[in-house]
Amino acid sequence: MNSKIWLSSPHMGGNELKYINEAFAENWVAPLGPNVNGFEEDLENFLGEDTKVAVLSAGTAALHLALIECGVGYGDEVICQSMTFSASANPIAYCGATPVFVDSEPETWNMCPAGLRQAIGDRIKKGKKPKAIIIVHLYGMPAKMDGIIAIAKEFDIEVIEDAAEALGSTYKGQPCGTFGRFGVLSFNGNKIITTSGGGALVCHTQEDKDKIVFLSTQARDNAPHYQHSHIGYNYRMSNIVAGIGRGQMEVLNSRVEARRSMHDFYVNIFKDIDGVTVFSEPSEDFYSNHWLSAITVNPQITGKTREELRMAFLEDNIESRPLWKPMHLQPIFENAPFYGGGVSEKLFNDGLCLPSGSNLTEDERLRIAKVINDFFGK
Ligand SMILES: *Cc1c(COP(=O)(O)O)cnc(C)c1O
């Protein structure tokens, strides 16, 4: 059996253990310490001057705290992109609120601004203004932020950007994760950089960051005894895990380059195969980290389905995956309102994510290319 080729696997830079060893040497084996502060500083430097970053135990935890800080509570409604991973929407349920899903547009696969406008208008007409909008930059592709932000401003609704997949991506030169009131990052094992598990919330004021750190460390009031006037959470990042993050930040730019080169590799393979489209930036305004390279397969033109291609990969021990199944089609959210048409459903039916790791070797690339070329008879 050939060795397994993963969709996206961890890729260490080299200095991660150095930071972890420092933590052990100084006994900072706790959810605070120099690595936590250092990792936050690295992220702030990367994302730009006006950012304040709080590192947390997961991207999902960051979303939960962002919703709480946007005032989302029991009975509220939150608009969320339907085409995404369930972790974008689950925290809405943690708050006792209801998600209102909006379809994608076909260029970036992210929330359709026209659908967003329609959803807000209709929810207001039905008597409830949504409390927040969760927008996702799928597979690293920036959403159409000009349109989204303009609509959010017009109706005075907070924007939370789920940039879990988009660290290193930019829209009109501005980093993804810095457009909304809050931006969510993830350092899960499969993301562009990883801390084994972890996340961060990007804020824009010291006040917001302080509040997030306070809530994530059990919300202890300033008193010598244990005094609480807020419900707290245990969501802070460990100083050990943050050490991995500091090592990974040293190589983030080269990881973005390598993922983008995987995208170019697929563009080159598929350029002569009619009916297969590689997911690519619609214009120069969009700069994707191409966390995952993805394609859509048109069965009418190719005479083949994406599922048959997935099985061909599997036979060679190569992992590929259908795109995220839209949230409005998930059993857990079957009663949630949905605005839009069939864009995300069609993407789910025809789309496939391909091996995209920054650590794929030349031999592995050759294996991938051979499966594709054999499958399409090239
Ligand atoms: C990975 C991911 C998350 C969750 O991040 P965790 O750190 O795994 O909790 C949220 N949203 C999207 C779009 C993701 O891909």
Image (tube, rainbow, N blue to C red):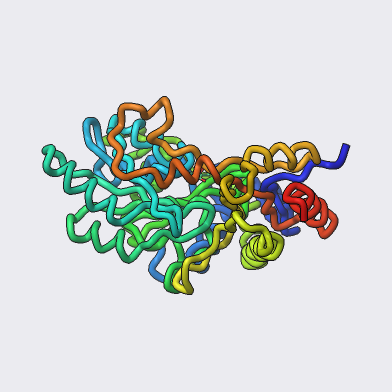
Position of the N terminus, as image quadrant, is top right
Q: Position of residue 216 (x, y in %)?
A: 41, 41
Q: Position of residue 74 (x, y in %)?
A: 24, 31
Q: Nearer the viewer, residue 191 or 236?
A: 191
Tally the marks.
Answer: 0
Quadrant in which residue 89 is drawn: top left
Q: Nearer the viewer, residue 275 or 218?
A: 275
Quadrant in which residue 233 is drawn: top left
Position of the C terminus, as image quadrant, is bottom right
Q: In the picture provided, is 353 more to the left or to the right than 127?
A: right
Name the residue located 67 percent from the left edge and 53 percent from the top edge: 356
Name the residue located 68 percent from the left edge and 63 percent from the top edge: 272
Q: In the picture provided, is 292 more to the left or to the right than 152?
A: right
Q: Is residue 250 visible?
A: no
Q: Nearer the viewer, residue 137 or 182?
A: 137
In this picture, is 15 found above or below 325? below
Name the residue located 38 percent from the left edge and 35 percent from the top edge: 328
In this picture, is 232 found above or below 137? above
The single residue placed furthest to the right in the displayed view is 1
Q: Position of residue 42 (x, y in %)?
A: 55, 64
Q: In the picture provided, is 168 more to the left or to the right than 362?
A: left
In this picture, is 214 found above or below 270? above
Q: Nearer the viewer, residue 100 or 234?
A: 100
Q: Is residue 50 visible?
A: yes
Q: In the picture provided, is 372 more to the left or to the right than 48?
A: right
Q: Position of residue 215 (x, y in %)?
A: 37, 41
Name the residue located 45 percent from the left edge and 58 percent from the top edge: 108
